[in-house]
Image (cartoon, grey):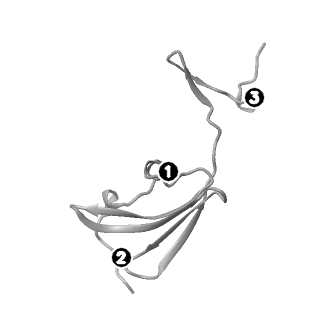
Amino acid sequence: MPKFATYPTCFDEVKAVTIGDLKRLGYLRTNAIVRGLYRWTRGGKPCGWIEVTVNLPERFLQLGYRVNGGDLISYRVRLESLPNTMAVVNGILLVHQRASDAEPSTE
């Protein structure tokens, strides 16, 4: 029977791709399909990569990566958009509240 790992999980080693990263790097283009390679480095040396395809017409994000040099894993994530319900008017943050979310009136 194999022995369980005794080393601690290091969350500072976790690699992440955020929607903010994809937007900043130009992957989120209206009605476009954009492909690329997202790479991570540590101390100036490559330490990981992931193939990224963003297909906004069909609303999905496709990720391709390898774990420990094994087979390529392809992972599809459905993209959803939410309406912007906030606005700033004269320095005041206004948040729109849907009728279904409103507190019932006691009057």
Q: Nearer the viewer, mark 2 or mark 3?
A: 3
- Which residue type does callout 3 highlight? Ala
**Earlier-in-chain disc, 2 versus 3:** 2
Who comes first in sequence, dot 1 or dot 3?
A: 1
Q: In terms of depth relative to the viewer, which is nearer, 33 or 86?
A: 33
Most extreme residue toward the top, as rendered?
A: 107
Is the C-beta separation of discs 2 and 1 under 8 Å?
no
Q: Is residue 25 above or below residue 44?
A: above
Image quadrant in which you'd find residue 86: top right
- Say few, some or many: other residues with alpha carbon within 10 Å of mark 1 (under 14 / 14 to 19 / 20 or more): few
Q: Nearer the viewer, residue 8 or 40?
A: 40
Q: CA distance from mark 1 to mark 3?
A: 29 Å
Q: Is residue 75 left or right of residue 18?
A: right
Label disc, if present, on residue 4 of the rendered structure: 2
Q: Quadrant of the N terminus?
A: bottom left
- C-alpha gap between disc 2 and disc 1: 34 Å
The residue where tag 1 is placed is: 19
The amino acid pointed to by label 1 is Ile
Q: Which amino acid, by three-letter code, is at mark 2?
A: Phe
The residue at the point 38 percent across, 60 percent down is 15
Dot 1: element:
helix
Residue 79 at x, y percent in the picture: 61, 54
- Distance between mark 2 and mark 3 Cα atoms: 52 Å
SS label for mark 2:
loop
Q: Mark 1 or mark 2, which is nearer the start of the sequence?
A: 2
* Element at label 3: helix
- At x 76%, y 16%, the residue is 106
Which residue is denoted by mark 3 in the rendering?
99
